[in-house]
Amino acid sequence: MFRASGIDLGKNGNRAVSVGAFWGAVKKETEPPSGMPSTAAVPSDKLTFRTLNVPNTSRDIQESVIREELMLSLPFSIEETSWDWVVNDDVATVFIVLNQDLRSFRERLGKDALIDAEPLSYLRLMKAAKTEEALIFDFGASRTSVCAVKSGCLDWVKVSFKGGDYLNKEIAKRYDITPEEAEQHKIALGTEEPVCRQWLNDLAAYNLLVKPVPFDKVFICGGGAQMKGLELELGTLLGQTVQPIPLPDGLSPYCDASAYGAALASKSKYPHISLEEVEPEKSDLPWKYAVWLLVILALASVNLELRKANAESVVQKQVAAYQEAAKPILPKLAEMQPETYQKELDALTEKNLRNTLLLPDSLLQNMARLAKPLKDAPSMEIRRLELKGEQENPSLIISGQTGTLQQVEEFRKSTEDIIKGPEIIDSRKNRAGVITFSIEGRL
C-alpha cells in the first residue's frame, strides 16, 4: 500500500504521522519511515505571507505577476528567498521563506523530503474535518501561531514569539525560581496563575480579537494547549467555545496536529506547495559560437584603439562644455568630472524631497487628509500628532482614543493612502472601556 508521511520538526524533537495516499488508516510513527515520501512544514515564524490578486490564467503568468509584486513589497531581496503559492478564485496566498532558513530545514530533512508551509497544514486539517470556518491556536514552546480560516481558505496568519518558554521565564522571574520549577508551577496552576491569564489577554489583544470573535469554531493544538483551564479561559476571552483540534483516533491534538496536517499534503484533493531553492540556470556556450565571439571581440578591440586617439580630444572638449554649463546653476558640479554628476544629482534630489515632505504646507495637507477617515469614525478622537525622524525617513505618529479595537484597525487601514506602512504601535483599554492607540507610518 502506498503511504506518505508528515514530519513536525519540533523544538523538543521530531514527530511523524503517515497516511495512505488512497486508502488505509492514519498511523503514528516513532520516526519518519525510510523509503516513504515525506513532507515537512516550515514554521509560521520563518515565513512571510502575501495575499495578491492574480489573473485566472496559467501559473507561468501568475508567477510573473507575483514576482513583480514581491520585488516591490518585500523588505529584503527576492533573490534571497524561495516562494510558492496557492490560488482560490483570483486570490493567491503566497508563502516566502529566506533561503538560509530553507537550507537549515533541508539539512535536517534530507534531499528527498518536500517542504510545505505550516499554515497550509492547519487549512488541510480543517478540510479533513469538513470545517469551512475556524480560528486555530497552536501553542508551541517558542511561539504561538494563530490561523484564521474563512470559506474554506486561509484568511490571515499571525505569530507571537511568546510561547511556553516565555511563560516559564516570566514565572521564574516573578517567583525567583528556576525555569524547570516554573514549568512545574505552570502545569500545576494553569490559568489560575496570573502570569498565564495575562499572557492569554495579551495574545487576544495582539491579534485584535474582541468578544465575540466572528468564527463559528475555535480550535487549539500544540503542547501548550494542555495547560490547565486554558480552554475555559480562552473561551471566556473570545466569547466562543474552545476545543482541541479534531484528529483521527490514535492521534493527539497536543502532539500530532502539525505532522498530520503535513502528511495530508500528499493527497491530491488538499492544497499544498513545494518550497525549493531555485538554482540560477547555467547555459554552456557551444565552442563554435565562442570562437566567433573571440573573433568579433578582437575586431572590436582594434576598432576601439583606432577611435581612441580621436575620441580623447573630443571628450576633453565635452568635459569643458559640461563644466561651463553647470557653473551658473550648480557651481559644485563644475569642479567635478561628468561621470560623478548622476550620483551628486541623486543626492540633491533625495535631500530636496525630504525637505519638501517637512514643509508646513505638505504637513498640513497630510493632516487635512485625515478628515475623511475620521468622518467615517465619528466616535474616534485624535489627541496628538507627532513628527518623528525629521532628518531622514520622517514619520508621523497619530495618537487618539475610540471605543473598540476593530475601529482602530479600520482607521489604520483607511490611512494607508495618507502615510506609508501604517502600523499600530500601541493600543490599550482603560478602566472606562476606552481604547487609547498610536499609529505610526512614514510620510
Image (cartoon, helix red, strand yellow):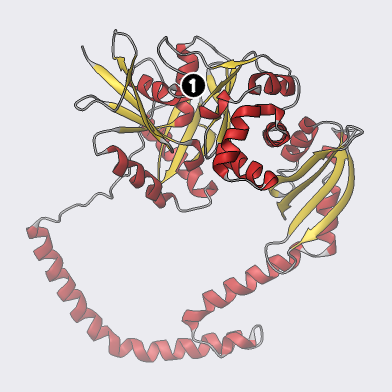
Q: Answer with left or right where residue 381 lies relative to residue 277.
A: right
Q: Is residue 363 above or below residue 437?
A: below
Disc 1 residue type (three-letter): Leu
**Which residue sits at x=42%, y=16%?**
251
**If the image is split into quadrants, where does the N terminus sit?**
top left
Q: Is residue 169 above or below residue 255?
A: below
x, y percentage for residue 159? 57, 37
Q: Looking at the picture, tell me which residue is in the foreground, 70 or 177.
A: 177
The part of the image, by quadrant, that contains residue 156 is top right
Q: Looking at the image, can residue 162 be seen? A: no
x, y percentage for residue 385? 85, 53
Q: Looking at the picture, tell me which residue is in the foreground, 154 or 355.
A: 154
Name the residue furthest left.
288
**Which residue sits at x=53%, y=21%?**
153
Residue receiving disc 1? 123
Q: Answer with left or right where residue 104 lies relative to residue 206.
A: left
The part of the image, by quadrant, that contains residue 26 is top left
Element carrying mark 1: helix
Q: Looking at the picture, tell me which residue is in the foreground, 282 or 36.
A: 36
